[in-house]
Image: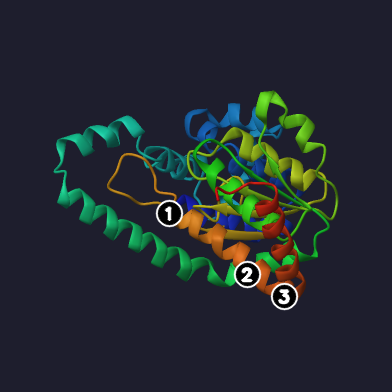
């Protein structure tokens, strides 16, 4: 019996295919709505999941727990350890030392993030690049602080491939942009906890419409990773008040580099043509 939410989510994913239809419905609700599980009664959770209350008890037992309350405790623990609010981290930063000390701690944290990220995801980047290369069109989405990561990936990729587009949801057009995702396409979604509602919607739409899904995220059981074809994990620890995206950007850059390498001479030729056109159109200052 595990008390760790990530371990529980992994267990559910592993055993999901063998569950009965009612257990699958209940298990899916647990993973998709962990906050609600932590705060609602068992009967209310069952009602929201559209299953019988007894099924939730039996599901808990199937997962190795004596009963519902022990299973629910895992979700309560997750809620207590969710990311610290930015305001709290900012207050801690102000109270702490600044200057050279902060600079050194920030540098050390970024170095650690890069080391952890590349040790976790280097192999997955290669697999993700192969998946993207085979797709007739690639969509990329990242919102709020993750937007620069998504934009940078699209910008670099489009230098040698035209069939790449950014899902930006500007002017409330997310639904219209999601309609462009088709079967056999690939979709890359960038998000970290607390996960953007828009990012989750893009991931769900990609799966519903038959697209391959690549999640660039901070947890193997994040909402965008649970059903993804490839998961690229990044670490975002920092002594500052806002999670660091240095490692996320590094993974995006590595992915673009890997894609260029896979494409070979043809991609280099297209890159050269793009670079020449940019100079001719006056994109750069003389």
Task: Determine the CA span between mark 1 and mark 3.
Answer: 27 Å
* Residue labelled with disc 1: 246
Which residue is situated farthest in the front direction here?
A: 286
The structure residue drawn at horizontal position 71% and vertical position 31%, both measured from the top left corner, is 174
Q: Position of residue 222 (x, y in %)?
A: 55, 48
Q: Left or right: 57 with respect to 182?
A: left
The quarter of the picture where residue 266 lies is bottom right
Determine crowd level at label 2: few under 14, some 14-19, many 20+ residues with C-alpha closer than 10 A: some
Q: Is residue 227 visible?
A: no
Please tell me how crowded label 3 is: few (under 14), some (14-19), or many (20+) other residues with Cα within 10 Å. few
Label 3 element class: loop
Q: Residue at x 68, y 37 (%)?
A: 201
Q: Nearer the viewer, residue 170 or 192?
A: 170
Separation of residues labelled 2 and 1 (CA atoms) = 18 Å
From the viewer's perspective, is residue 16 above or below residue 69? below
Q: Is residue 57 above or below residue 117?
A: above
Crowdedness of circle 1 by 10 Å Cα count: few (<14), some, many (20+)?
some
53 sits to left or right of 116: right
Which numbered circle lies on residue 228? none
Give whichever of 222, 257 is nearer the camera: 257
- Residue position marked by numbered label 2 in the rendering: 258
The numbered mark at residue 264 is: 3
Residue visible at 51% across and 44% down?
67
């Amino acid at each position: 019996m595990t008390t760790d939410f990530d371990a529980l989510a992994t267990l559910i994913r592993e055993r999901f295919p063998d569950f009965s239809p009612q257990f699958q419905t209940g298990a899916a609700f647990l993973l998709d709505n962990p906050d609600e599980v932590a705060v609602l009664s068992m009967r209310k959770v069952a009602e929201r999941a559209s299953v019988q209350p007894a099924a939730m008890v039996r599901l808990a037992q199937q997962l190795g727990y004596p009963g519902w309350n022990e299973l629910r405790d895992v979700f309560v623990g997750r809620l207590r350890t969710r990311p610290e609010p930015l305001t709290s981290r900012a207050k801690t930063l102000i109270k702490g030392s600044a200057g050279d000390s902060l600079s050194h701690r920030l540098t050390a944290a970024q170095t650690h993030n890069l080391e952890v990220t590349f040790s976790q995801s280097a192999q997955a980047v290669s697999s993700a690049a192969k998946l993207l290369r085979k797709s007739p069109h690639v969509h990329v989405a990242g919102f709020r602080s993750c937007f620069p990561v998504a934009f940078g990936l699209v910008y670099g990729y489009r230098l040698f491939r035209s069939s790449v587009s950014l899902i930006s949801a500007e002017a409330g057009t997310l639904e219209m942009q999601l309609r462009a995702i088709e079967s056999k396409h690939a979709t890359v979604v960038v998000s970290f906890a607390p996960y953007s509602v828009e990012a989750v919607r893009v991931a769900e739409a990609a799966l519903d419409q038959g697209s391959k899904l690549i999640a660039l995220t901070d947890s193997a059981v994040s909402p965008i990773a649970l059903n993804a074809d490839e998961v690229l994990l990044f670490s975002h620890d920092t002594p500052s008040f806002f999670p660091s995206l240095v490692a996320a950007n590094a993974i995006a850059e590595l992915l673009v580099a890997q894609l260029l390498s896979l494409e070979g001479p043809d991609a280099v030729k297209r890159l050269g043509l793009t670079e020449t056109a940019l100079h001719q159109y006056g994109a750069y200052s003389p």
